[in-house]
Image (tube, grey):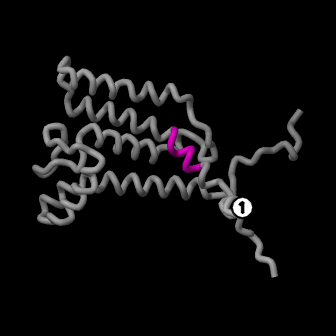
């Protein structure tokens, strides 16, 4: 027996706040990744002030050791290979997020998956740190990208949840003005 129309759950919502949130986060991620790659390109094309400003901003987030960084146009990226992987993985996963999960879901996977995604990065770091194995740009990038891409599944639901809040009510502001 088919369900009654009262039991119908619409698959489309007229509330577009989660989509706008995703678009904003995607734009920020793409901007950050563009800056990481844009710094060496700016330096190569003689825009020293711009390049130094970008390198300076990212110096607070990354050690920027040249031996551990990718290069383009004979200049190093604004962050190391591992950080590049983190940012690239996060950006790619953010762009593909609507294909992976509903934009209305605010739950996150079990925390164990985040720790499992961080494990290869920790092992790669530890083996290199203790001199057991010399990690490479590729191993740094891949382990960073894995953690960055899985992190999206924990960060985006939080942003979506924030976008769905009724901020006027939470801040004590009236939605209808009284005359």
Q: Could you tell whether 8 is left or right of 106 in the image?
A: right
Q: Is residue 141 left or right of residue 134?
A: right
- Viewer-closest of 108 and 130: 130
Instruction: Give the image quarter of residue 138.
Output: top left
Side (left or right) of 19 relative to 150: right
The part of the chain drawn in magenta is 154-160
Q: How many numbered circles does the render carry?
A: 1
Q: Position of residue 157 (x, y in %)?
A: 56, 44
- Image quadrant of residue 88? top left
Residue at the bottom extreme, as displayed? 179
Q: Residue at x 61, y 57 (%)?
A: 17
The quarter in which the C terminus is drawn is bottom right
- Read off the residue under disc 1: 169
Q: Nearer the viewer, residue 17 or 159?
A: 159
Does 100 sit above or below residue 21? Answer: above
Q: Is residue 128 left or right of residue 157?
A: left
Q: Is residue 16 magenta?
A: no
**Predominant secondary structure in magenta?**
helix
x and y percent of residue 28 in the render? 41, 56
Secondary structure, mark 1, is helix
Q: Is residue 42 above or below residue 79?
A: below
From the viewer's side, name the closer residue of 25 and 167.
167
Q: Is residue 156 magenta?
A: yes
Q: State the residue at coordinates (21%, 48%).
A: 77
């Amino acid at each position: 027996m088919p369900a009654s129309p009262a039991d119908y759950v619409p698959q489309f919502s007229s509330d577009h706040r989660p989509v706008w949130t995703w678009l904003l986060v995607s734009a920020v991620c793409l901007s950050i990744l563009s800056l990481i790659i844009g710094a060496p390109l700016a330096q190569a094309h003689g825009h020293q002030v711009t390049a130094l400003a970008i390198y300076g901003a990212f110096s607070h987030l990354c050690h920027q050791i040249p031996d551990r960084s990718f290069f383009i146009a004979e200049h190093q990226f604004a962050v190391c290979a591992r950080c590049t992987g983190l940012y690239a993985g996060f950006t790619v996963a953010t762009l593909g997020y609507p294909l992976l999960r509903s934009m209305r879901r605010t739950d996150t996977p079990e925390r164990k998956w985040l720790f499992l995604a961080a494990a290869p990065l920790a092992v790669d770091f530890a083996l290199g740190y203790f001199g057991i194995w010399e990690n490479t740009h590729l191993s740094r990038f891949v382990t960073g990208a894995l953690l960055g891409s899985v992190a999206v599944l924990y960060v985006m639901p939080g942003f979506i949840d924030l976008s769905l809040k009724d901020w006027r009510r939470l801040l004590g502001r009236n939605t209808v003005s009284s005359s």
